[in-house]
Image (cartoon, rainbow, N blue to C red):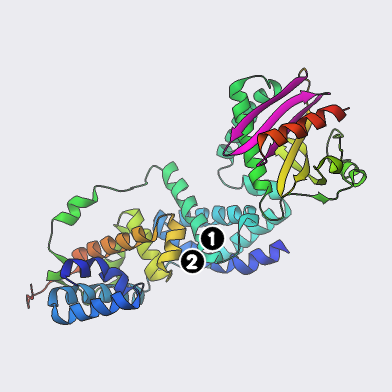
């Protein structure tokens, strides 16, 4: 019975789980290990699942498992000094976003600090609402919004071209 | 709405997470402000570029089989699932925890040990209140509850019903405290759930000591070669009253 509910409500999101883990850990091998561990945790704690969105519930476990993994491997690049990067450099409205190629986009996203990266992945690639992102990342909705704003400002700085027309 | 106010809302606007009134205001503003319009446009282009670029990572085809196998193993053998990965970390943590908890179960008089036990009791109590976790055997009849423990424990817990005193027995379950399996008898006082934990103890008899953890009242005592612990959100006086009643009947 529980097994059937688990297969119905959680197992279908294995691709979303893998995508998030792959972006957070940065390589295939670790992503596979983390997702397997996360699924086993999810299975074990399934009686705590209160119903609702199985995807957000699973992704929260995947994220926590990733963070444990990153802490163990000492490569958790949390919250570098963000303000420096954001205070200097061209203003976003003087830049133009066009014809972005896949590889430079991928690299720019991979270089984001992890809490910005996960917000972008959950929003753009998994299509989660702010509310669901807030649930997965355990922060208020307002924080989700500001992380997305700052993440996008960084990406635009990294990828934008000087606007020759010069509207500003 | 001025530029600063608009900029604060551009992200939520682009994500359609803004209420209608504010969306309308952003739209009005960007019609007359090229700089803010550029911010909106850049975010929209960035979004569609990311979404169109196929940046999702797909698991290798072998991964589905691996995950299915791991989940099947977990379904067959829940204990194995616990240590499937990072087994040494889990085992080491388990041994340390067991040592800490075992030392405290053996010496119920120590305050630090008491607070550890109290925390574990409250964690267990809170877990038991989650849906479907309170009882393994649901019965107000002690002649149903007591035999249910047969073969599941290496001791036979004393089981009494106190409906006449306003503490009806509603059931029992197995739980785990300090690495050993204990009997839990579930009583009620009006709408309050009371968990009574019972396990064998060689410690000399003691009168109930009270503790409060996270707002839950706890009473611990030793008597008749059993350790007894009551945990509830019931007020302390009534819980104490229940403890006194239990002590009178203990074998």
Front tag of 1 and 2: 1
Q: Residue tagged by mark 1?
A: A58
Q: Are there few (<14), some (14-19), or many (20+) residues within 10 Å of tag 2?
A: many
Q: Would residue A64 appear left or right of A104 to someone viewing this image?
A: right
Task: Say above or below: B221 vs B172.
Answer: above
Residue for point 33% across, 48% down:
A77
Q: Is residue B134 left or right of residue B97?
A: right
Instruction: Estimate the spatial distance between the alpha carbons at disc 1 and disc 2, rounded to whole Å.
Output: 9 Å
- Are the residues at dot 1 and dot 2 in contact (C-beta closer than 8 Å)? yes
Q: Which residues are magenta?
A: B205-234
Which of B9 and B214 lies nearest the eye of the viewer? B214
Residue B69 drawn in magenta: no
Q: Earlier in the sequence, mark 1 or mark 2?
A: 2
Per the rendering, the mark at residue A16 is 2
Closer-to-camera residue (B201/A91) = B201
Residue A109 sits in which quadrant? Answer: bottom left
- In the picture, measured across the screen, residue A163 lies left or right of residue B89, that is left
In the depicted structure, whether residue B163 falls above or below residue B237: below
Location of residue B193 in the rendering, given as x and y in whole percent from the top left corner: 71, 46
Q: Dot 1: within a 10 Å radius of its alpha carbon, few (fewer than 14), some, or many (20 or more) residues?
A: many
Disc marking residue A107: none
Of B127 and A29, nearer the camera is: B127
Chain for disc number 2: A
Residue A86: image location, x then y, percent: 19, 56
Q: Residue furthest top?
A: B204
Task: Assign the C terminus of chain A to one quadrant of the image.
Answer: bottom left
Above or below residue A135? Residue B28 is: below
């Amino acid at each position: 019975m529980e097994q059937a509910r688990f297969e119905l409500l959680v197992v279908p999101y294995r691709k979303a789980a893998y995508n998030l883990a792959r972006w957070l850990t940065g390589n295939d091998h670790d992503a596979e290990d983390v997702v397997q561990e996360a699924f086993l945790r999810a299975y074990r704690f399934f009686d705590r699942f209160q119903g609702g969105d199985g995807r957000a519930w699973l992704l929260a476990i995947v994220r926590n498992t990733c963070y444990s993994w990153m802490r163990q491997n000492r490569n958790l690049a949390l919250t570098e000094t963000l303000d420096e990067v954001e205070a200097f450099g061209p203003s976003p409205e003087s830049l133009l976003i066009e014809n972005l190629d896949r590889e430079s986009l991928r690299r720019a996203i991979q270089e984001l600090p992890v809490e910005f990266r996960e917000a972008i992945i959950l929003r753009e690639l998994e299509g989660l609402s702010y509310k669901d992102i807030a649930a997965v990342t355990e922060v208020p909705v307002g924080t989700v919004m500001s992380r997305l704003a700052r993440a996008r400002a960084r990406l635009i700085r990294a990828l934008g071209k000087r606007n020759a027309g010069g509207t500003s | 709405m001025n530029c600063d106010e608009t900029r604060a809302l551009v992200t939520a606007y682009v994500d359609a997470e803004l209420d209608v009134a504010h969306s309308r205001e952003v739209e009005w503003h960007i019609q007359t402000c090229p700089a803010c319009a550029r911010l909106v446009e850049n975010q929209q282009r960035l979004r569609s570029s990311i979404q169109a670029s196929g940046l999702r990572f797909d698991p290798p085809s072998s991964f589905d089989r691996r995950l299915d196998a791991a989940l099947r193993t977990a379904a067959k053998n829940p204990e194995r699932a616990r240590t499937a990965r990072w087994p040494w970390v889990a085992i080491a943590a388990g041994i340390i925890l067991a040592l800490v908890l075992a030392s405290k179960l053996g010496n119920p008089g120590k305050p630090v040990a008491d607070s550890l036990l109290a925390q574990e009791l409250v964690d267990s109590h809170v877990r038991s209140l989650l849906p479907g976790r309170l009882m393994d055997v649901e019965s107000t009849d002690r002649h149903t509850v007591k035999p249910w423990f047969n073969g599941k424990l290496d001791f036979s817990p004393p089981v009494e019903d106190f409906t006449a005193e306003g503490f009806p027995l509603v059931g029992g379950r197995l739980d785990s405290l300090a690495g050993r399996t204990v009997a839990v008898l579930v009583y009620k006082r009006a709408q309050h759930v009371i968990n009574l934990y019972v396990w064998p103890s060689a410690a000399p008899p003691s009168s109930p000591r009270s503790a409060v953890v996270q707002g839950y009242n706890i009473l611990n005592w030793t008597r008749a070669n059993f350790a007894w612990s009551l945990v509830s959100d019931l007020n302390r006086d009534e819980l104490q009253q229940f403890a006194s009643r239990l002590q009178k009947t203990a074998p």
